[in-house]
Amino acid sequence: MGISSNITRKRLKIILFIAISIFSIYFTYLFHVQILRGYLHDERARLTSRRFDIVETIRGTIYDRHGRSLAENRGRYAIAVTLDKVPEEERNMLIARLSSSLAIPRQDIAQKLNAHNKNDPDPVEIGDKFVLQDIVHIAEHAEQFPGVKWYVKNFRYYPEKERSSHVVGYVGQISSEELQILHNQEYERGSIIGKSGVEFQYDAVLRGKNGNRYYRVDAYGREIETEEFVDPIPGHDLVLTIDNDIQNLVWEALGERIGAALVLKPASGEVLAMVSYPSFDPNSFYTKNARQAFNAVSLHPHSPFLNRVIQSAYPPASTFKIIMTTAILEEQVFGLKQTVDCIGHYELGDRILYDWQRGGFGRLNIFQGLALSSNVFFWTVGLERLGIDHIVDYSLNFGFGENTGIDLPNEQSGNVPTPEWKSRTFKERWTAGDTANFSIGQGFLNTTPIQVANMISVVANGGRAYRPFVVKEIRDRTTGSLVERREPELLSEIELDPATVENVQRALSGVVEFGTANQVITTPVVEVAGKTGTGQVSSRTDRFDSWFVAYAPFDAPPEEQVVVVVFVEAVNEWEWWAPKAANIILHGIFTESKYSEAVTSLRQARALWYL
């Protein structure tokens, strides 16, 4: 009996221990779940019910130097569909109605909607280029468009359209390739980014920073309350060096001719006008037919996206004789009173090189040689006196073969050929014929119009060239206060004898006074110094590039002068238009008149025979 009782007590103790252990484990688990993990579940539930919307920032406005808008923000309508509010059996019908009403291909809408879960409570945007009539139609037939909402979005508008597009540029949605590069700079899918021009170069300044609105939703995805609002930071405004009046004057003077034109201040580098043709209207990229418009520009045979002022390099032709004249005088290899007998051709070995005037010019000194642009003169002095090394050195000193560093993207450097370059590139030795071509701005030498502008700026400034720039000021969009002002930056300085500078300036004045530009630079309101250039693109064609580079007023200090460069490509019908356009531009600038007014004024002065 005693043994049985002990066994019973031991069993009870074991059972009690097991029961207590099980209870303890269960209690501990409940405590862990209810208390310790409760905080975690609450936080997860809070985060699950928390959503956010991006609050779009305002991109900075771009102004010309007088405060006239060149790129601004305007409102337009976007349309989105909230999928969890669209019965599944009505989705195809909704897509069909939207396609018909908004003139959007059905497959484009379906593709955007099908990329999201059918129960997604967040609106899916199907487009953002709609006008008020589109919204009115949907609102009037709201029962046919379940789950459809609309709202206003900012878009970029360019008042000057194609006239300033190469300077200002345009914006668009960031591409996947761009996002891979910029993902760590607060860009994300759908970000708007500058694609060209100032919009691209100063995107970080213009874009600002988006804000966020955080809010909570219930189990059905319906908004309950706003928890937090982070204000967007607007982008800064930009004030350009561009004068829109001069920009329009230059645009109309160049006309529908493939080429480029530029006006800048030689004493500071400020670009007053920059035109490249053909151009493009960036506003067409923000319409319903944006894809077709972009493709049309991209596939155009003459590359409207190309800014020919800084992105195309050409032989400078006889404008290069400015550098040749400077080098000849500075190196003192040919005296002011010495002459060359320009008989219309030059014998180079077994070759005969013909001047542009077959009959020749007779005996010419250096002033007459530049004014009449005699090839024989520069072949003779270049080959027999100056030599290739000096020609190369002065070309480089004047900035050829290097970027100017203008604050615009994708500038090209052109090419200054050397014997070493030719050997490396073509595995051929340098010849006297190469030096002859180089001496008159032909052959392998290539320069951009902005480099040619800097070339004559050196002469106007007595040896100094300032870095060209197009953004003058950065201003706070909210307060209008100045954030940063661009100051002139010395790009290069050539140590030239003052007598050399004076004589080159005098020679350039002679080009207009009695030389090749005498018949076309006819404006009576300002004295002009400049140089014509005519480049034959092939010996088998009668097509020629047309150059004219000038500064005015000739007798004014550099601070009061402007430099004008006009270039017309040989693909245009030959009409020797570059100096003719420059004449109208210079007359318009110094009479403060528009193109039509300048033309009328020149006609009244009987100084415009070619229009």
Image: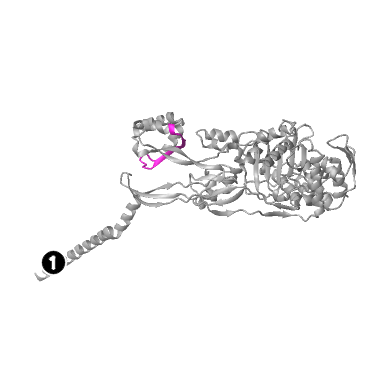
In this view of the protein, which residue sits in the foreground, 273 or 224?
273
Is 87 placed above or below 332 here?
A: above
Q: In which quarter of the image is the C terminus?
A: top right
Position of 523 with respect to 121 (left or right) is right
Q: Which colour scheme is used?
A: one colour
Q: Report the residue marked by disc 1.
A: 8
Q: Tell me what residue is drawn at x 54 percent, y 35 percent.
A: 284
Q: Where is residue 173 in the image (x, y as percent from the top left)?
A: 51, 42
Q: What stretch is highlighted in magenta?
A: 116-133
Closer-to-camera residue (198/483): 483
Identify the amino acid type marked 1: Thr
Is 127 one of the magenta-colored residues?
yes
Q: Which image quarter holds the N terminus?
A: bottom left
> Does the magenta-highlighted stretch encompass residue 157?
no
Q: Which residue is drawn at 59% across and 54% down?
A: 485
Residue 297 is at least partly visible in this image: yes
Q: Residue furthest left?
A: 1
Q: Position of residue 387 (x, y in %)?
A: 84, 49
- Can residue 378 be spotted in the picture? no
Rendering coords of residue 87 (x, y %)? 33, 35
